[in-house]
Image (spheres, helix red, strand yellow):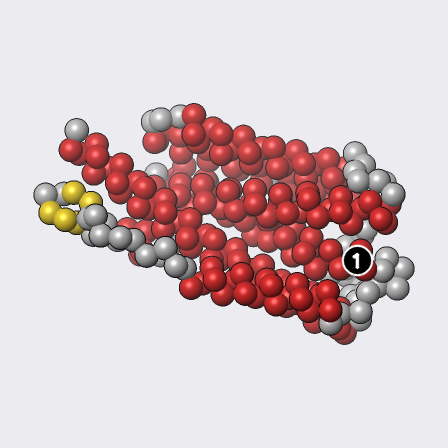
Amino acid sequence: MSDTLARPLPSAGAGRPSRAPVAVFDWLLALAVVALVAVTARAIWFTPPEAMQGEAQKIFYIHVPAAVMGLYVACPLVAIGGAMYLWLRDDRLDRLAESSAEIALVFLTIVLVTGPMWAKPIWGAWWTWDARLTSTLFLWFILLGYTVLRGAIEDRQQRARYSAVLGILAAMLVPFIHLSVRLFRTMHPQPIVLAPEKPKLSAEMGMTLSLAFLAFALLLVALLRARLKYAALRDRVEALEMGEA
């Protein structure tokens, strides 16, 4: 856990937060945006289209990394942060779960937007109610409910407990979503990147996809870092205000 979460706010004296301007430029987030733009340009102009799907397949370089980061990194962090909070009652773990849930919601929104954009030219339909698509949408609604729940409960400890339970339940959907294409008949493609046999991608496509994974991983780290800083500052200000009341 980063020690920046416990770092006190700059003080102007007498326990009051400083009025000094807070730097808004985040170099890591800027680097992540540049990496995303670069990998998008490589996918569009320097990576050959897939033989069967044509140009529509290039949405793959956004859709798949967003799904992997949202489902397999951000969602588990929500559950880990929530479970550890229930055990240790450390506010930093609640902030980790809260921040990860919002980031998971962002990445799954990208997945649910880019998925239909790919499906329409390939399947001839924007959406089908198959197991993977429906369960992913259900997870998105749970994460949305998680953020609404946090805004509806004023008591900090009660909010953290309820959120932790809901976050753990949300993350339990991830294994089902992962296995859904094998357990049910679906139009969604079978695993390509995590296929047990040799990956079904050319060298150029594989390189672009690898760079896309790096760019999205960098974006996740940058967003999580920025969100954790914001949450720590918010809680510190609230604590100071309650102390002055």
Q: Is residue 125 left or right of residue 116?
A: right
Structural crowding at the residue carrying mark 1, measured as other residues with C-alpha within 10 Å and reported as few (<14), some (14–19) or many (≥20):
some
Of residue 163 and residue 121, the one placed in the foreground of this image is 121
Q: Which residue is mark 1?
A: 57
**Residue 11 appears at what percent x and percent y?**
17, 49
Q: Does 127 sit above or below residue 48? A: above
Q: Residue at x 45, y 41 (%)?
A: 98
The quadrant the C terminus occupies is: top left
Q: Residue at x 40, y 26 (%)?
A: 153
Q: Residue at x 14, y 49 (%)?
A: 12
Q: Does 32 sit above or below residue 86? A: below
Quarter residue 27 falls in: bottom left
Quarter residue 242 falls in: top left
**Residue 194 appears at what percent x and percent y?**
72, 59
**Residue 173 appears at what percent x and percent y?**
64, 38
Residue farthest along the right direction in this orientation: 52
Q: Is residue 197 left or right of residue 227?
A: right
Of residue 14 and residue 132, the one placed in the foreground of this image is 14
Q: Residue at x 21, y 48 (%)?
A: 19
